[in-house]
Amino acid sequence: MIKFSRDNLSLAFERFGHGAPLVLIHGFPLDHTIWDEIVPLLKDDFDLILPDLRGFGQSDAADADYAMRDLADDLAALLDHLGLESAFLAGHSMGGYVALAFASAYPRRVRGLALVASQAAADAPERRQGRYAQAWNIAENGIGDTVAAMTENLTPDPRVRKFVHDLMRRQKTSAYIGSLKAMAERADTMQALEESAFPLLLVHGDADGLIPVERAREIQARVPRARLVELPGCGHMPMMESPRPAADAFLGWIK
Ligand code: MLT
């Protein structure tokens, strides 16, 4: 992987292909390898940039607490490092929250935004408390309970479930805790999306057991210019469960 430094952290990313720059941002608690199957389908049309968010994959973990805005600033630093003024952004689940934080902070740097199995709503108070409890449990007992709970609801596809389970097991405890706090404290971005002007794409499986497809439908209802692509029978990992239709959604978006 390629590395660059920001905030005293070494942050890793991959880059493949040629065309319009598209940053593919992974979700929680994963890394850039979730995009491996879709890369060959997109690399002739996009300059694909695949970061490992701070703490995940081969990127360093931060010592102190951080917010979604810090993860967005990591992305801005990555674009600066690559000499890119703007890019398309596609965020999977928590990666969508990072993309939305980036769009709030740097609207002019966004050529288009795609939310893949993600949402614009902030956590309800009980969900936020649940995240703090989960972070506490991880600090005390490790990641086992979280991995088990997420695996169960992730996807109907056993091959994808196994891959993601093994990937989750490899991530650092500090990245789990840091991201749970950042997710708990993230802002609601629905109004910012309504007021934004960049092209908006929503890709969501209708069998997503972690973030229900209704969240994408709500965005579409509030932001009529958004293009919603619903993938039948697909769970929380569209780029692995339905790579061809997910890639076609991206290709249709820039054509
Ligand atoms: C993710 O898949 O990134 C997370 O499940 C998102 C969330 O917990 O809100």
Image (cartoon, rainbow, N blue to C red):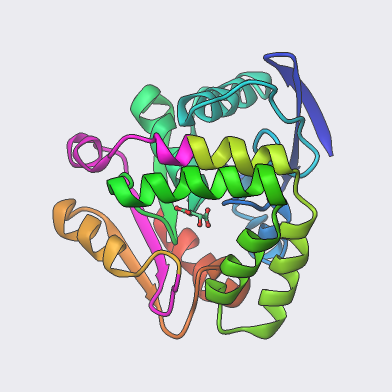
User: Which percent across, then down, holds residue 129?
Assistant: 39, 45
User: Which percent across, then down, holds residue 54?
Assistant: 67, 33
Asked if the magenta segment contains residue 208, the reply would be yes
Q: Residue at x 60, y 49 (%)?
A: 137
Left or right position of 222 against 100: left
User: Which percent across, then down, holds residue 102?
Assistant: 44, 30
Q: Which residue occupies the foreground of this view, 115 or 97?
A: 97
The residue positioned farthest toward the right in the image shown? 1
Q: Is residue 35 visible?
A: yes
Asked if the magenta segment contains residue 140, the reply would be no
Please determine whether, in this image, residue 92 is positioned above or below residue 6: below
Left or right position of 127 against 79: left
Left or right position of 201 against 163: left
User: Which percent across, then down, holds residue 57?
Assistant: 76, 44
The residue positioned farthest toward the top in the image shown? 8
**Residues shaded magenta:** 182-209
Please determine whether, in this image, residue 232 is positioned above or below residue 62: below
Indicate the quadrant where residue 175 lies. top right
Q: Residue at x 64, y 69 (%)?
A: 148
Q: Residue at x 77, y 30 (%)?
A: 60
